[in-house]
Amino acid sequence: MVAWPVAARAQRADRMRRIGVLMAFDENDPKAKGWLSNFTQGLAELGWTDGHTARMDVRWAAGNVDQMRTFAKELVELQPDVIFASTTPVTAALQRETRTIPIVFVIVSDPVGAGFVAGLARPGGNITGFTNVEAALGGKWLEMLKEIAPRVRRVAIMFNPDTAPGGGAYFLEPFEAAARSLAAEPITARVRNDAEIEAAITSLGREQAGLVLMPDSFMQVHQGTVISLTARNNVPAIGADLPGFAREGGLLSYGANFPDIFRRAAPYVDRILRGANPADLPVQAPTKYELVINLKTAKALGLDVPWQLQQLADEVIE
């Protein structure tokens, strides 16, 4: 772990640097492409442009854990100067392949619990980056959903245990605690494919239950399926930290501003390319959050959105 910074300082300043990028999302997802563009634009402003001062090797895993592991191995074999990683499972896949190449992550909820860093202030290894959410939001999402759908008495939290933080455990305790305080029965909905998503949401519709989507790359890739099924089955749902959920037809979403997180990661990559040690770069938390409410969807579900909540929203879709 101490060898690579010495080597980095010894490299010629005019050498074209190699940056590996492993995105957890689908290459055809316009939102994810936009987030990556925020990152590359941030790098360009710092003097790193693809094909000129740097070469970027980009891989897209489409929420598939096996693909993440395959691409992680590919990128490490290319021996880049630094790797940019999005989400917890992608970072985990890269960590399995290297403990020396610097890694800058985004969209990781619990980097200490996942074993990526020793501490937030001093990561201590080859990995650092930017978190997107705290465990306490597991309860906040349910509270917001209940404000809009107060009659809901059962609420499920849906996630893929293969891609969710801590296998899903990271958010479960605050979610279940909030459910108890709000007189709602918590339900755990573990899903790994579209068929399981459909079965779970159809069941929630029969029970007149609500839904919280846990933030993970799988749910991001499959959020279109969730939006369609919740509308068909009359299930009020909040896309927890899933950008675009409310804008694309979901009821509401609340979470970190992803474009901002991706742009903030560029200076960390820049500092590492110029010789900084990731062990000394503190892990940073989000500075911007977004609440988006879709009034059209609320009306279709027969729900009234409290005026106070609308006033707090960053965007209200009518």
Image (spheres, helix red, strand yellow):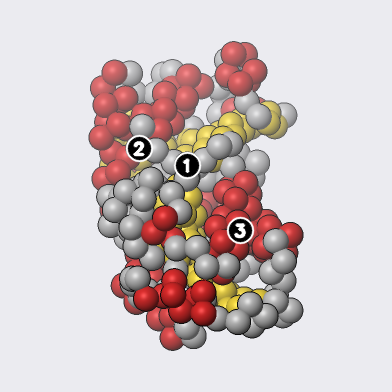
Distance in Å between CA atoms under marks 1 and 2: 13 Å
User: Horizontal placement of 54 versus 188: left or right?
Assistant: right
Residue 20 locus on image (x, y percent): 53, 74
State which tag comes first along the sequence, 1 or 2.
2
Of residue 38 and residue 82, the one placed in the foreground of this image is 82
Q: CA distance from mark 3 to mark 2?
A: 26 Å
Name which residue lies at 37% across and 76% down.
Answer: 3
Tag nearer the camera, 1 or 2: 1
In the depicted view, which residue is nearer to us: 291 or 132?
A: 132
Give the residue at x 44% y 61%: 278
Across and down, in percent, residue 73 comes to: 40, 81
Which residue is identified by label 1? Answer: 285
- The residue labelled by disc 3 is 266
Helix, strand, or loop for circle 1?
Answer: loop
Instruction: Write down the quadrant of residue 91 in the picture.
Output: bottom left
Task: Please provide percent x and percent y for residue 106.
Answer: 49, 55
Of mark 1 and mark 3, the one earlier in the sequence is 3
Q: Which mark is residue 135?
A: 2
- Residue 201 seen from this side: no
Q: Residue at x 46, y 27 (%)?
A: 145
- Please name the amino acid that badge 3 sits on: Ala
**For discs 3 and 2, the disc positioned in front in the rendered view:** 3
Q: Is residue 232 left or right of residue 282?
A: right
The reply to whether discs 3 and 2 touch (Cβ–Cβ < 8 Å) is no
The residues tagged by marks 1 and 3 sit, at their Cα atoms, a distance apart of 15 Å
Image: 215 above or below 172? below
- What's the residue type where badge 2 is placed? Ala
Pointer 1 and pointer 2: residues touching (CB < 8 Å)? no
